[in-house]
Protein backbone atom coordinates (compact mmCIF):
# COMPACT_ATOMS: atom_id res chain seq x y z
CA UNK A 1 0.00 0.00 0.00
CA UNK A 2 2.69 2.48 0.98
CA UNK A 3 4.80 1.66 -2.09
CA UNK A 4 2.16 3.01 -4.48
CA UNK A 5 1.40 6.59 -5.45
CA UNK A 6 -2.25 5.68 -6.02
CA UNK A 7 -3.96 2.53 -4.73
CA UNK A 8 -6.75 1.34 -7.02
CA UNK A 9 -9.30 -0.60 -4.99
CA UNK A 10 -10.38 -3.24 -7.48
CA UNK A 11 -14.04 -3.50 -6.55
CA UNK A 12 -15.01 -4.46 -10.11
CA UNK A 13 -12.92 -7.65 -10.04
CA UNK A 14 -14.71 -10.95 -10.44
CA UNK A 15 -15.64 -12.42 -7.05
CA UNK A 16 -13.93 -15.76 -6.44
CA UNK A 17 -15.03 -18.21 -3.79
CA UNK A 18 -12.33 -19.53 -1.46
CA UNK A 19 -10.11 -16.51 -2.08
CA UNK A 20 -9.51 -13.54 0.22
CA UNK A 21 -12.52 -11.44 -0.82
CA UNK A 22 -14.54 -12.32 2.27
CA UNK A 23 -12.05 -14.03 4.57
CA UNK A 24 -8.55 -13.85 6.04
CA UNK A 25 -6.36 -15.81 8.43
CA UNK A 26 -5.53 -15.09 12.04
CA UNK A 27 -3.41 -17.00 14.54
CA UNK A 28 -4.95 -19.05 17.34
CA UNK A 29 -3.53 -21.44 19.97
CA UNK A 30 -4.37 -24.22 17.51
CA UNK A 31 -2.63 -22.56 14.58
CA UNK A 32 -3.89 -20.38 11.71
CA UNK A 33 -7.65 -20.12 11.35
CA UNK A 34 -9.96 -18.40 8.87
CA UNK A 35 -12.17 -15.46 9.78
CA UNK A 36 -15.05 -15.26 7.31
CA UNK A 37 -17.76 -12.74 6.47
CA UNK A 38 -20.76 -14.71 5.14
CA UNK A 39 -22.07 -13.72 1.71
CA UNK A 40 -25.16 -14.60 -0.26
CA UNK A 41 -23.94 -17.36 -2.60
CA UNK A 42 -22.55 -15.15 -5.38
CA UNK A 43 -22.01 -16.63 -8.82
CA UNK A 44 -20.20 -14.89 -11.64
CA UNK A 45 -20.50 -11.32 -10.44
CA UNK A 46 -18.14 -8.44 -9.69
CA UNK A 47 -17.10 -7.94 -6.09
CA UNK A 48 -19.02 -4.68 -5.75
CA UNK A 49 -22.28 -6.58 -6.36
CA UNK A 50 -21.68 -9.24 -3.69
CA UNK A 51 -23.97 -8.79 -0.70
CA UNK A 52 -23.21 -9.78 2.86
CA UNK A 53 -25.47 -12.33 4.55
CA UNK A 54 -26.70 -10.39 7.57
CA UNK A 55 -29.02 -13.13 8.77
CA UNK A 56 -26.08 -14.11 11.00
CA UNK A 57 -24.45 -11.77 13.49
CA UNK A 58 -21.05 -12.16 11.89
CA UNK A 59 -19.75 -8.82 13.23
CA UNK A 60 -20.19 -9.95 16.81
CA UNK A 61 -18.70 -13.37 16.06
CA UNK A 62 -15.61 -11.88 14.38
CA UNK A 63 -15.12 -9.36 17.20
CA UNK A 64 -15.36 -12.06 19.88
CA UNK A 65 -12.98 -14.32 17.95
CA UNK A 66 -10.40 -11.53 17.73
CA UNK A 67 -10.71 -10.88 21.45
CA UNK A 68 -10.43 -14.57 22.33
CA UNK A 69 -7.18 -14.91 20.38
CA UNK A 70 -5.54 -11.50 20.78
CA UNK A 71 -6.62 -10.17 24.19
CA UNK A 72 -3.11 -10.84 25.52
CA UNK A 73 -1.37 -9.18 22.56
CA UNK A 74 0.56 -6.00 23.55
CA UNK A 75 -1.41 -3.62 21.34
CA UNK A 76 -4.85 -5.25 21.33
CA UNK A 77 -6.50 -2.77 23.70
CA UNK A 78 -5.15 0.16 21.69
CA UNK A 79 -6.98 -0.82 18.52
CA UNK A 80 -9.79 -3.20 19.42
CA UNK A 81 -12.42 -0.49 19.88
CA UNK A 82 -12.17 1.09 16.43
CA UNK A 83 -11.92 -2.28 14.69
CA UNK A 84 -14.91 -3.66 16.59
CA UNK A 85 -16.90 -0.49 15.97
CA UNK A 86 -16.34 -0.80 12.23
CA UNK A 87 -17.26 -4.49 12.15
CA UNK A 88 -20.42 -4.05 14.17
CA UNK A 89 -21.66 -0.66 13.01
CA UNK A 90 -25.19 -0.90 11.60
CA UNK A 91 -25.50 -3.54 8.88
CA UNK A 92 -23.01 -3.63 6.06
CA UNK A 93 -24.82 -4.47 2.85
CA UNK A 94 -22.09 -4.86 0.24
CA UNK A 95 -18.85 -6.76 0.79
CA UNK A 96 -16.81 -4.28 -1.27
CA UNK A 97 -17.89 -1.37 0.93
CA UNK A 98 -16.81 -3.23 4.07
CA UNK A 99 -13.46 -4.24 2.55
CA UNK A 100 -12.67 -0.73 1.38
CA UNK A 101 -13.53 0.69 4.79
CA UNK A 102 -11.24 -1.89 6.41
CA UNK A 103 -8.39 -0.93 4.07
CA UNK A 104 -8.95 2.73 4.95
CA UNK A 105 -8.92 1.93 8.67
CA UNK A 106 -5.64 0.03 8.38
CA UNK A 107 -4.12 2.91 6.40
CA UNK A 108 -5.21 5.33 9.13
CA UNK A 109 -3.81 3.15 11.93
CA UNK A 110 -0.47 2.84 10.14
CA UNK A 111 -0.38 6.50 9.07
CA UNK A 112 -0.25 5.61 5.37
CA UNK A 113 -1.50 8.48 3.21
CA UNK A 114 -1.57 6.82 -0.22
CA UNK A 115 -4.40 8.15 -2.39
CA UNK A 116 -7.13 5.54 -2.90
CA UNK A 117 -9.46 5.28 -5.88
CA UNK A 118 -12.29 2.79 -6.41
CA UNK A 119 -12.10 1.01 -9.75
CA UNK A 120 -15.86 1.44 -10.08
CA UNK A 121 -15.38 5.23 -10.13
CA UNK A 122 -13.12 5.06 -13.21
CA UNK A 123 -14.28 5.11 -16.85
CA UNK A 124 -15.32 1.63 -17.91
CA UNK A 125 -12.78 0.17 -20.32
CA UNK A 126 -13.52 -2.01 -23.32
CA UNK A 127 -11.20 -4.92 -22.62
CA UNK A 128 -12.10 -8.17 -20.89
CA UNK A 129 -8.49 -9.31 -20.74
CA UNK A 130 -7.22 -9.20 -17.10
CA UNK A 131 -3.90 -7.56 -18.00
CA UNK A 132 -5.52 -5.03 -20.33
CA UNK A 133 -8.02 -4.08 -17.62
CA UNK A 134 -5.20 -3.25 -15.22
CA UNK A 135 -3.45 -1.21 -17.89
CA UNK A 136 -6.64 0.75 -18.60
CA UNK A 137 -7.17 1.50 -14.90
CA UNK A 138 -3.55 2.58 -14.44
CA UNK A 139 -3.79 4.95 -17.38
CA UNK A 140 -7.16 6.26 -16.16
CA UNK A 141 -5.50 7.63 -13.01
CA UNK A 142 -2.55 9.02 -14.96
CA UNK A 143 -0.12 6.28 -13.99
CA UNK A 144 2.78 5.06 -16.10
CA UNK A 145 3.68 1.99 -13.98
CA UNK A 146 1.55 -0.85 -12.61
CA UNK A 147 2.88 -2.26 -9.33
CA UNK A 148 1.70 -5.83 -8.86
CA UNK A 149 1.89 -8.11 -5.88
CA UNK A 150 4.05 -11.24 -6.23
CA UNK A 151 0.98 -13.27 -7.24
CA UNK A 152 0.84 -11.33 -10.50
CA UNK A 153 3.66 -13.50 -11.85
CA UNK A 154 1.08 -16.28 -12.24
CA UNK A 155 -1.58 -14.48 -14.28
CA UNK A 156 -0.32 -11.24 -15.84
CA UNK A 157 0.62 -11.27 -19.53
CA UNK A 158 3.84 -9.29 -19.61
CA UNK A 159 3.67 -8.90 -23.38
CA UNK A 160 0.62 -6.65 -22.95
CA UNK A 161 2.56 -4.08 -20.94
CA UNK A 162 4.01 -2.06 -23.79
CA UNK A 163 2.16 1.17 -22.96
CA UNK A 164 3.07 1.24 -19.27
CA UNK A 165 5.77 -0.34 -17.12
CA UNK A 166 5.13 -3.43 -15.00
CA UNK A 167 6.81 -3.94 -11.65
CA UNK A 168 6.38 -6.65 -9.03
CA UNK A 169 6.65 -5.96 -5.33
CA UNK A 170 8.60 -8.44 -3.25
CA UNK A 171 7.52 -7.88 0.34
CA UNK A 172 9.89 -9.41 2.83
CA UNK A 173 8.35 -11.93 5.21
CA UNK A 174 9.85 -10.27 8.26
CA UNK A 175 9.30 -12.32 11.39
CA UNK A 176 7.80 -10.40 14.29
CA UNK A 177 6.71 -11.35 17.82
CA UNK A 178 3.43 -13.29 17.84
CA UNK A 179 1.35 -15.10 20.39
CA UNK A 180 0.94 -18.86 20.26
CA UNK A 181 4.31 -20.29 19.31
CA UNK A 182 6.65 -19.92 16.33
CA UNK A 183 6.17 -17.19 13.73
CA UNK A 184 3.43 -17.86 11.20
CA UNK A 185 3.58 -15.83 7.95
CA UNK A 186 0.78 -14.71 5.61
CA UNK A 187 -1.77 -13.70 8.22
CA UNK A 188 -4.18 -10.77 8.26
CA UNK A 189 -2.51 -7.44 8.97
CA UNK A 190 -4.46 -7.27 12.24
CA UNK A 191 -2.11 -9.94 13.61
CA UNK A 192 0.84 -7.58 13.17
CA UNK A 193 -1.13 -4.56 14.40
CA UNK A 194 -2.20 -6.27 17.63
CA UNK A 195 1.29 -7.66 18.25
CA UNK A 196 3.49 -4.79 17.03
CA UNK A 197 1.35 -1.66 16.96
CA UNK A 198 2.96 1.32 15.23
CA UNK A 199 5.98 -0.78 14.22
CA UNK A 200 3.76 -2.64 11.74
CA UNK A 201 4.33 0.06 9.13
CA UNK A 202 8.07 -0.62 9.23
CA UNK A 203 7.51 -4.38 9.00
CA UNK A 204 5.43 -3.96 5.85
CA UNK A 205 7.77 -1.51 4.13
Image (cartoon, helix red, strand yellow):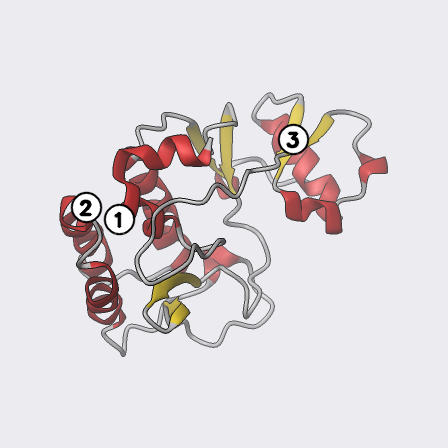
- Whether residues under marks 3 and 2 lie with C-beta atoms below 8 angstroms apart, the answer is no
Tell me the residue that label 1 is attached to. 194
What residue appears at the point 55 percent right and 38 percent down from the top-left corner? 172
Mark sitting on residue 146: 3
Label located before the other in sequence (1 or 2)? 2
What residue appears at the point 37 percent right and 67 percent down from the top-left corner? 35
Please give left or right for residue 118 compared with residue 77 in the image.
right
Q: Nearer the viewer, residue 147 or 9?
A: 147
Look at the picture and state if 172 lies above or below 49: above
- Residue 10 placed where, x, y %? 53, 45
Give the Cα separation between the discs numbered 1 and 2. Answer: 7 Å
What residue appears at the point 34 percent right and 73 percent down from the top-left corner? 53
Tell me the residue that label 2 is attached to. 79
Label located before the other in sequence (3 or 1)? 3
Give the Cα separation between the discs numbered 3 and 1. Answer: 31 Å
> Secondary structure beneath disc 1?
helix
- Mark yes or no: residue 128 visible: no
Amino acid sequence: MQQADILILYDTAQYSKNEYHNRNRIKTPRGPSWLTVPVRSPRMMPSLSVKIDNTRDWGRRVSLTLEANYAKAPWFRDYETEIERLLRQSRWERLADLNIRLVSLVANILDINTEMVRASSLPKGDSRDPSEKLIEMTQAVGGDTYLSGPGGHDYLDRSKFDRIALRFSSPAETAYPQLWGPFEPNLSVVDAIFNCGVETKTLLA
